[in-house]
Image (spheres, rainbow, N blue to C red):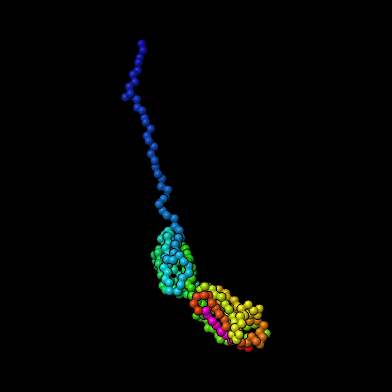
Amino acid sequence: MVWVTLVTWSSVFLKQPKPASLRLRPQGDETSLQANVPEVTFTKSSTSTEFNKGDSLDLTCSAQGTPDPTLMTLTRERNDDILKSVQTAELTHTLNSLDCLDTSVYVCSGQNSQGTTSKEISISVNCAQQFSPLFSPSPKVDGVLGETAEVDIEIYGFPEPSVTLQRTVDNANLTSSPRHKVKYTSSVAPFGFVNVTISDLVESDYTTYTLTIDNGVGDALVYSFYLNQ
């Protein structure tokens, strides 16, 4: 006798694998921003760097950083003069009626808790040479026979000048004379110095001299002095 076992589908339990679940482990706040010092943008309303007296110029400065900048400062570098300071991320300042002493480097700084970043703009204002406000020209210079007499003159103006030395009595040009030296040296713009040196003094050197300082803008600056024994 043969026994037959019937297996029905209902008696078979097929276990299907469950789909894998995806678990995301927190890896920190991916949206957080890294702190950094400000990035400064500094522009002016004209592409030129040279201006005439009476012109106006707008300076605009902005900064971006993390955290946001909390202080913007505009400074004239020559005398560290703070022109404007704001507790925002943008600053605008107008230089009205430009004058010779507006010639300088301008510095804009943006600051946040991470540090300070600065950008510079340099401008020059065309103007005739003048005596420095702190310089008082003397009409007489002392010199000892056989030695060297020296004259220093502080001036300001833009552009830099050419300088000529003449003996007043006969208008003789002494600029290229071996014993007469005339030199201009630039300082912090727009200031500079003119140095006159007369060496190995002889009797005929004791006379009046005319120094002409000219940069091609307006009238030349003329300074006369008497060399006294």
Q: Residue at x 63, y 80 (%)?
A: 180
Q: Residue furthest left?
A: 10
Q: How many marks?
A: 0
The quarter in which the C terminus is drawn is bottom right
Q: Residue at x 63, y 87 (%)?
A: 206
Give the extent of the magenta segment: 220-227
Q: Residue furthest bottom?
A: 229
Give the image location of residue 15, x and y in percent: 36, 30
The quarter in which the N terminus is drawn is top left
Q: Is residue 46 visible?
A: yes
Q: Nearer the viewer, residue 92 or 200?
A: 200
Q: Is residue 190 visible?
A: no
Q: Residue at x 36, y 28 (%)?
A: 14
In the rendered image, the vertical position of residue 8 relative to residue 200, given as above or below: above
Give the image location of residue 122, x and y in percent: 49, 68
26 is within the stretch colored magenta: no
Q: Residue at x 44, y 66 (%)?
A: 46
Give the image location of residue 68, x and y in percent: 41, 60
Corner quadrant of residue 177? bottom right
Corner quadrant of residue 69? bottom left
Magenta-drawn stretch, dominant element (helix, strand or loop): strand
Corner quadrant of residue 212? bottom right
Q: Nearer the viewer, residue 12 or 117?
A: 117
Give the image location of residue 207, x and y in percent: 61, 87
In the rendered image, the vertical position of residue 30 relative to residue 164, given as above or below: above
